[in-house]
Image (spheres, coloured by chain):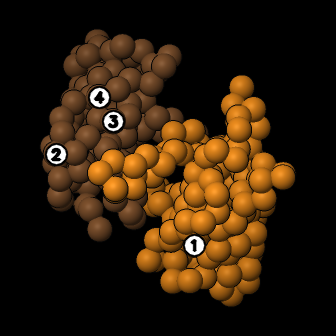
Amino acid sequence: DIQMTQSPSSLAASVGDRVTITCQASQDISNYLNWFQQRPGKAPKRLIHDASNLETGVPSRFSGGGSGTRFTFTITSLQPEDIATYYCQQYDSLPLTFGGGTKVGIK
Amino acid sequence: QVELVASGGGVVQPGRSLRLSCSASRFTFTTYVMHWVRQAPGKGLEWMALMSSDRNNVYYADSLKGRFTISRDDSKNTLYLQMNSLTAEDTAVYYCARGLLTLARIKEHYDMDLWGQGTTVIVSS
């Protein structure tokens, strides 16, 4: 199974700050990576697919990058509505696997 | 608006069975791979199973140990998860999700995009 290691597990930043989350795959997954946002009590929502492609309607302050085994997810200017847990997920191979999540809060 | 609605959760005793349903609307259900994913209280996401659009390909996480069965009824636009021999470790929110299969250099890639709202299963005596 491909292990997805996400860091940090939690962070707190001020409104307007730049926030970056990293995701490391245990083997090469090319660009077969999604980023999901899960607000408290809600279902996950996909923000980015194929490592760097933004879903339609998702604000441009969200972005993703990387390929192979190392990936990043960035919020360029944190907003109050971005309070959520973010997960990376690989779909290179079965079983599909998720990172452990990064809980993003406001200072 | 495209929607997935999961139902069938509840409180069930250890060792008993439960069947979850996921009703799809406003998209062509028959063209999508369908997944089940669960989330234990306060924990992360765990992929459980998928069924391809033609029902020919079914895959499960090893952790399910043959206790769970995924199925779909395209005439009802509905996905199911039959869960048997439930234990406390199966307590979770269960989500259905849709996805697409892509083929690249003969390798299959099963994506997931839209998720339903989840249904809660509590296994307790």
Disc 1 chain ID? B
Disc 3 chain ID? A
Residue extending farthest right: B76
Q: Chain B: give its colour.
A: orange
Label 1: state its secondary structure. Answer: helix
Q: Nearer the viewer, mark 2 or mark 1?
A: 2
Is residue B96 at all visible to an observer of this figure?
A: yes
Disc 2 chain ID? A
**The quarter of the displayed image where residue A79 is located:** top left
What amino acid is at disc 3? Asp
Answer yes or no: do the residues labelled 4 and 3 have beta carbons within 8 Å?
yes
Q: Quadrant of the C terminus of chain A?
A: top left
Residue A19: x and y in percent read 24, 25
Q: Chain A: give its colour.
A: brown
User: Which residue is under mark 2?
Assistant: A68
Which one is earlier in the sequence, the residue at label 4 or at label 2? 4
Residue B37: x and y in percent read 54, 57
User: Which residue is under mark 3?
Assistant: A50
Mark 1 Cα shell of 10 Å, populated few (<14), some (14-19), many (≥20): some
Q: Residue at x 26, y 40 (%)?
A: A31
On screen, residue B23 versus residue A13, left or right, reads right
Disc 2 and disc 3 on one polypeptide chain: yes
Q: Residue at x 76, y 37 (%)?
A: B25
